[in-house]
Amino acid sequence: MPGEQRNAPRTRREVIEAAARALIAHGPGVSLDAVAKEAGVSKGGLLHHFRTKQALIVGLIDDWFDHYDATVARLLEPEDTPGRWTRAHIRATFEPDDLWSHPSVVTALLGVPELQQRLDVAATRWRQQTDSDGLHPQRADLISRALDGVTLADLLWRGQESPEERAQTRDLLLKLTEQPGPLV
């Protein structure tokens, strides 16, 4: 409506979500025009929030990590028990998320140099959470590496595992958090 003021943070969020949907619909070569149309904003409005397509993709990367961190926080058990951070990461990794794990979105993100820098920062944060979790380092490391494998399998072999198989893997990893000591 004329004269109506947009909420800048909300608009930025809508543009990022629209970029993910546009990537799914059009692939990594998606245009800024297609993203603006998907977001319901003018191209100028999109460029106000993201000056370049690269900046938009970096915003998508940041949102990807923010989304995962918010999911972990939501799934974090309130009581201070050993393994609670690790269990939250396990549950977050296995929680379905078709938008952020879609191959077209991931393919677009993998080609961005800033991804590795942001991944290093996030991985350090996640490692600090699980390392201070009260589980034996050997146990925490095994679970962390298993989650990396699950994530990679989700990207490379999407849909190859049945929901039952995924649940079994999740439950096995959760069971590994029940004992804080070493594995052997």
Image (spheres, helix red, strand yellow):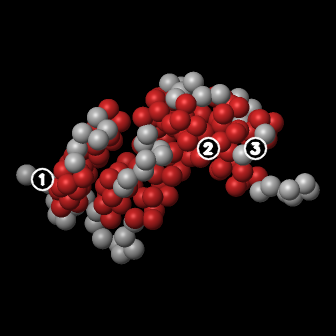
Q: Position of residue 129 (x, y in %)?
A: 39, 55
**N-terminal-most mark, 1 or 3:** 3
**Which structural element holds mark 1?**
loop
**Which structural element holds mark 2?**
helix
How packed mark 1 is, by other alpha carbons closer than 10 Å (few <14, some 14-19, many 20 or more), is few
The residue pinned by badge 1 equals 183
Q: CA distance from mark 3 to mark 2?
A: 10 Å
**39 with respect to 155 (left or right):** right
The residue pinned by badge 2 equals 18
Residue type at mark 3 is Val
Residue in view at x 75 percent, y 44 percent = 41
**140 with respect to 128 (left or right):** left
**38 with respect to 107 (left or right):** right
Q: Quadrant of the N terminus?
A: bottom right
Residue type at mark 2 is Ala
Residue in view at x 43 percent, y 39 percent = 102
Q: Position of residue 87 (x, y in %)?
A: 30, 60
Position of residue 29 relative to residue 43, above or below, is: above
Q: Look at the image and tell me whether residue 133 can be seen.
A: no
Q: CA distance from mark 1 to mark 3?
A: 54 Å
The residue pinned by badge 3 equals 41
**Which structural element holds mark 3?**
loop
Instruction: Determine contact: label 1, label 3, CB under 8 Å.
Output: no
Residue type at mark 1 is Leu
How packed mark 2 is, by other alpha carbons closer than 10 Å (few <14, some 14-19, many 20 or more), is some
Q: Nearer the viewer, mark 1 or mark 3?
A: 3
